[in-house]
Image: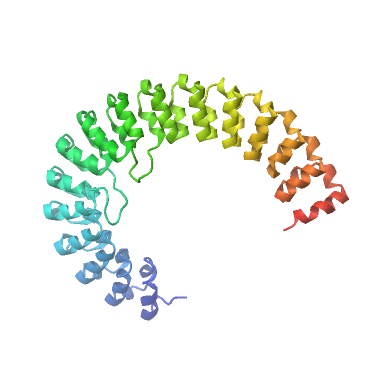
Amino acid sequence: MTDWNNKEEVMTVVKKRTDRLQRASEELRADKEVVLAAVNNFGDALEYANEELRADRDVVLAAVDTWGSSLEYASKELRADREVVFAALREDGRALEYASKELQADKEVVLAAVRNNGDALEYASKELQSDREVVISGNRPYDDNHLYHTGKLLSASKELREDREVVLNAVRDFAHNLKYACDELRADKEVVFAALEGDGSALEYAHEELRSDKKVVMAALESRSWHGFSTSGDLLEYASDELKADREVVMTAIKLTGDALFYASKELKSDKEVALAAVTKNGHNLEYVSKELCADREVVLAAVKDSGYALRHASEELRSDKEVVLAAVKEDGDALEYASDELKADKEVVLAAGSYALDYASEELRADKEVVLAAVKSNRYVFKYADESLKKDPDFMKEVEQYLTD
């Protein structure tokens, strides 16, 4: 147990967690040596220092050096101190939020902030949010501390969001800046292609006219996302209805994400080749194919081999097809829930379904020693589904007992 009045003990613990200084006695929270020990490890511990030390230049500089945003807890005077603020911005540009109004209107200070983290533009003065150099400097998607930023154009002035050069610079750095561009530039092919080159999902923000352009949509689907992975086929959602009915576009989307079938036209959901591509990618997509194809043996078999649970979307006839149901339960035993009553009473099918299938097996098979024993060997908890006659059979209970205990 730490003695929060004991300087030596407190000096040790404040180096381990940011909130430890809060527990220290009032006297120790006013001790410069103790507070320095804390903020040298956790800058935000400055919050718990006494008022006098939050106005101490040495203490605050040590704090912002490890956690730029601890500038929030510094005295009013130090939040207006250029050296202190620059130190904070070197660690995190967003610390500009806590700088004085004067420094938020200082171009040199704001440039330092946005070059570290473009999101800091939000905290710059209105005048500097309209400064081309500041906005362009801030549109950098990567820095040493963050994987990516949100849209920097969000805080830019209306005039700069209408400036083609600024917007091009912005979307090349981070595609989703397209969201904040003016309507005219969201309809500008060069601007949109520049955004899609960085991340195909920026298609969401393209003008409606360009979301009807096949070359634009195909470019989006063939692009890479900001983190280097393939673009999701789900962005088919943002394509025009005409392109959702375009076979080439839809097949390209499905190859990326089978779920893209959800956004395809009714006609393509009835196209066997399209449906096969989707369910092979992810069996659950059987949910989106037409009623006719849910009764197509080849399509359903492809679906349940990938995801047995897809059996729930198969036609009643195919849920009575032993080959289809066997394929489904071998992939996922719980799929037995959707098999016909006849197949729930089929010993081969139930045994293939494994332990959890005992819940859905027919009453007759729940009383079958071989079926119950096989299930319990895999999972003792399913014994509760066994028929009462077996639970009262001493010979069977002796045989199964070893599987029911830990």
Write the residue at 80% across / 44% down. Answer: 370
Closest to the observer, 100 or 171: 171
Closest to the observer, 302 or 192: 302
Q: Position of residue 332 (x, y in %)?
A: 63, 40
Q: Is residue 59 above or below residue 130?
A: below
Q: Is residue 216 left or right of residue 355?
A: left
Quarter assignment of residue 301? top right
The figure's colour scheme reads: rainbow
Quarter assignment of residue 226? top left
Q: Is residue 48 above or below residue 400?
A: below
Q: Position of residue 399 (x, y in %)?
A: 83, 52
Q: Is residue 131 visible?
A: no
Q: Is residue 31 above or below residue 231?
A: below
Q: Is residue 332 left or right of residue 46?
A: right
Report how many numbered discs are placed on residues in the image.
0
Write the residue at 31% across / 39% down. Answer: 199
Write the residue at 17% across / 63% down. Answer: 77
Q: Is residue 17 visible?
A: yes
**Quarter of the figure with the C terminus:** bottom right
Q: Position of residue 309 (x, y in %)?
A: 60, 35
Closest to the observer, 264 or 95: 264
Q: Is residue 375 above or below residue 47?
A: above
Write the residue at 35% across / 35% down. Answer: 222
